[in-house]
Image (cartoon, coloured by chain):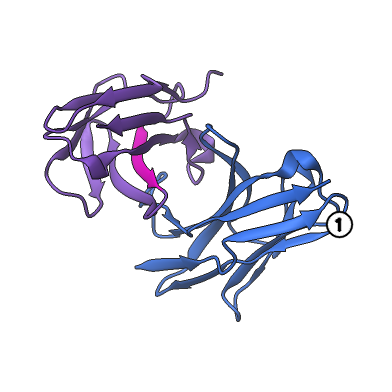
Amino acid sequence: KAGVTQTPRYLIKTRGQQVTLSCSPISGHRSVSWYQQTPGQGLQFLFEYFSETQRNKGNFPGRFSGRQFSNSRSEMNVSTLELGDSALYLCASSGGETHNEQFFGPGTRLTVL
Amino acid sequence: AQSVTQLDSQVPVFEEAPVELRCNYSSSVSVYLFWYVQYPNQGLQLLLKYLSGSTLVKGINGFEAEFNKSQTSFHLRKPSVHISDTAEYFCAVISTLSNFGNEKLTFGTGTRLTIIP
């Protein structure tokens, strides 16, 4: 079974631009969560989607948004990028028999210049 | 709400020596506990998890952890480390009230384990 995939793996943007990151969960998983990882703040929860609905949201500004499609693939969008948005963005999927475990993708490294 | 404390940000250990990475948590509800490992430029990989039952859980790569409810701890141990264990280790908790895989995972700040040859 293929793991969680994230595209692109690396991204460089400038301040003020917007960016869209993509995550494909493990086949059969219906829940997708997003986390931001930075050296200063560590791993922080952004939001979680289940069956195309946002079920849970972390403490991030409205510039961070997401969505989930009917095939469970998810995208997150960051608008009006700031230098502080530079981070590794991790996607995790869960579901099926191992619903208590979240499986992580390799992440997208976003650099904002 | 939950919180996780990993007191040691960095732990250097000689190869083949034992290691313990400490994790303490705080929660107003029951939690499941996890240890993840992150190798450079990679995502997180699950090492082991405690859901219920025996408080001593064994994971991959020879790691084990013991859940101590009275001390709210979930320390990770390995009797003999290898160079390949060099990585960052994260302790995480999630409320047992989560349904079908969610609420959010709450992570500790991580412990960087460095193996000295």
Question: What x and y, as percent, mark residue B99?
Answer: 38, 50
Question: What x and y, as percent, mark residue B68?
Answer: 64, 73
Figure quadrant of residue A89: top left
What color is chain A drawn in?
purple
**Quadrant location of the N terminus of chain B in the rendered image:** bottom left
Main SS of residues in magenta: strand
At a point 27% along the width and 37% down the height, the residue shown is A49
Question: What x and y, as percent, mark residue A55?
Answer: 24, 45
Q: Nearest the camera: B44 or B67?
A: B44
**Residue type at mark 1?**
Ala
User: Can residue A36 be found in the magenta stretch?
Assistant: yes
Q: Is residue B87 left or right of residue A49?
A: right
Q: Nearest the camera: A88 or A57?
A: A88
Q: Nearest the camera: A55 or A75?
A: A75
User: Can residue A72 be found in the magenta stretch?
Assistant: no
Q: Is residue A46 left or right of residue B45?
A: left
Determine if residue B91 is in view.
Answer: yes
Determine if residue A23 is in view.
Answer: no
- A70 relative to B51, above or below: above
At a point 33% along the width and 31% down the height, the residue shown is A110
- B111 relative to B38, above or below: below
- A46 relative to A5, above or below: below
Q: Is residue A86 left or right of residue B38?
A: left
Residue on which disc 1 sits: B17
The range drawn in magenta is A30-38
Q: How many marks?
A: 1
What color is chain B drawn in?
blue
